[in-house]
Image (cartoon, helix red, strand yellow):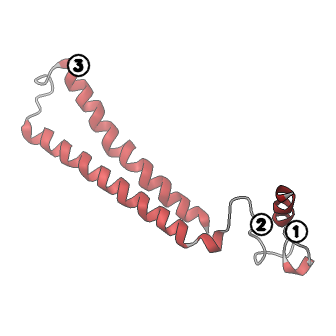
Amino acid sequence: PFLGDLVDLLGATLVPISCYILPILLLLRSLCDRGLDSLGLGAAELTLAFVEVVLAIVLMVYGSATAVSNIAHHWDTYGPPFACHCEDVWNTCACSPARNLECPASHAEGLLQH
């Protein structure tokens, strides 16, 4: 279940950068190197590029905040990192109720406290 939220977080963070912001930055770098008149872009195109960068930043911030909020909301379901999460998934897990064993992560927590 955590994979879906992780994909949301990575997508919200990386897609606006790689698909919107980076190409526009490369275009602006090209304009700076060759001069503003070399590509024939006018004020309308540059304004549209600026609006697109602002929209991408808003999308990135809102999407990342929403993904982090979803992860925090589901924290009780996911549990802490490296904890045993297979209790109710299958009976072959070391911490499944059918085996009547404690979760190995609880032993590790006990060792860290000493």
x 42%, y 61%: residue: 65
Quarter of the C terminus within the rendering: bottom right
Q: CA distance from mark 1 to mark 3?
A: 61 Å
How dense is the environment of label 3, judged by Cα within 10 Å: few (below 14), some, or many (20 and up)?
few
How dense is the environment of label 1, judged by Cα within 10 Å: few (below 14), some, or many (20 and up)?
some
Q: Quadrant of residue 89?
A: bottom right
Q: Nearer the viewer, residue 39 or 65?
A: 65
Q: Is residue 107 above or below residue 60?
A: below
Q: Position of residue 67 (x, y in %)?
A: 47, 63
Q: Badges 2 and 1: C-beta atoms under 8 Å apart?
A: yes
Q: Nearer the viewer, mark 3 or mark 2?
A: 2
| Three-letter code, disc 2 | Cys
- Mark 3 = which residue? 33
| Three-letter code, disc 1 | Ala
How dense is the environment of label 2, judged by Cα within 10 Å: few (below 14), some, or many (20 and up)?
some
- Mark 2 = which residue? 84
Q: Earlier in the sequence, mark 3 or mark 2?
A: 3
Count the marks. 3
x 73%, y 59%: residue: 82
Q: Residue furthest left?
A: 43
Q: Quadrant of residue 84?
A: bottom right
Q: Position of residue 78 (x, y in %)?
A: 65, 69
Q: CA distance from mark 2 to mark 1?
A: 9 Å
- Mark 1 = which residue? 94
Quarter of the N terminus within the rendering: bottom right
Q: CA distance from mark 3 to mark 2?
A: 54 Å
